[in-house]
Amino acid sequence: MNVNSFGLLNTFCLVLNSGQHNSDYAIALYLMPRLGNIQSVSITEIIDNAFVTRSAVRRFCNRMGFTSFSDLKDGITSALFPSDLNARDLEQDLNLYRVALDSGIQRMFMQMEQTVDNEVIEGLAQELHRNSHITLACAGNTSGVLNRFQQELFFAGKLTEVVTNDYESRLTRKPAQITSLLVVVSASGVFARSFDYLIRQVDARKVLITANLELLNWDAYDRVLCLSEDQEGRDALGIYGKYGVSYFFDLLSSSYLHLFGSPIST
């Protein structure tokens, strides 16, 4: 799997939300409702219906992090879609889903009280403070959490870099790496597993935050924080990905701002 697949939907959203109605926008707008059947879409179809040139399609693919339209289609096919729709029973009505979700979230809170207690969170806040350049990397479907965390740390004068797409060029863009601490967030472990070869090229201290230890080889990381006590790695409702990661970074932000932030004037 091309690691850029994990940021692909995020990049699509950036194009669609840019407000620039250019060739990239026209191509993304045409492809968006066809993502589920992308393998049947041809370049000629895009040219005829999005009113763009063949070279515009090629440039669009390159900006998405792929060398060709064929590679882009394979990336879309293998991309992790936001949420857990691939594992969820969509015939389950709202009441049954809500009962299962509430129960799962309560269990998650109890587990995280043990797996990432206050000492662990405060220790990571201290480590963030000690390092001069922090990079946070995740798949596109986790980007909202990390972007919010990045913005909250502004109030403590701490700058972090969030990488949610175009991973290879952004993390290896300089011969001498400037990152002193790299935090990889991968609730299911799939992103971290696909990202492993790139992680090994980054000269920095590396921390992994996950809820699944089953898929992973830990030796690329200096420290691994697992949010879940479950060892089977099965999170069918995506509870840790959607709620656990958000809860963890909310606690981490609160800890950092308490330790290193200045009171906010009103």
Image (cartoon, grey):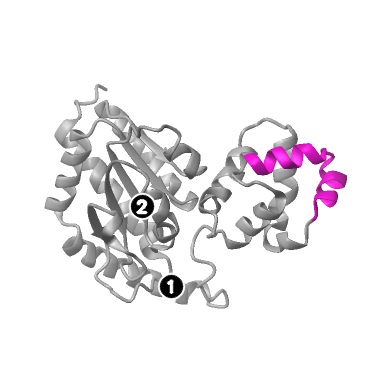
Disc 1: which residue? 236
Q: Secondary structure at mark 2?
A: strand
Residue at image coords 75%, 35%: 23
Residue numbers of the magenta segment: 42-62
Residue at image coords 41%, 58%: 242
CA–CA distance in space, label 1 to label 2: 18 Å
Q: What numbered label is drawn on residue 185? A: 2
Is residue 54 one of those drawn in magenta? yes
Q: Position of residue 252 (x, y in %)?
A: 24, 45
Residue at image coords 46%, 73%: 97
Comparing 124 with 217, the one in front is 217
Q: Position of residue 129 (x, y in %)?
A: 20, 34
How packed mark 1 is, by other alpha carbons closer than 10 Å (few <14, some 14-19, many 20 or more), is few
Which of disc 2 and disc 1 is earlier in sequence? 2
The quarter of the rendered structure image containing the C terminus is: top left
Is residue 79 one of those drawn in magenta? no
- Closer to the observer: label 1 or label 2? 2
Q: Is residue 49 left or right of residue 195?
A: right
Amino acid type, label 1? Ala
Q: Is residue 108 left or right of residue 53?
A: left
Q: Look at the picture and state if 59 lies above or below 187.
A: above
Name the residue at the right extreme.
48
To which quarter of the image does residue 59 belong?
Answer: top right
Comparing 42 with 97, the one in front is 42
The quarter of the rendered structure image containing the N terminus is: bottom right
Comparing 110 with 230, the one in front is 230
Q: Label 2 near label 1: C-beta < 8 Å?
A: no
Residue at image coords 42%, 49%: 198
How packed mark 2 is, by other alpha carbons closer than 10 Å (few <14, some 14-19, many 20 or more), is many
| Magenta: main secondary structure | helix
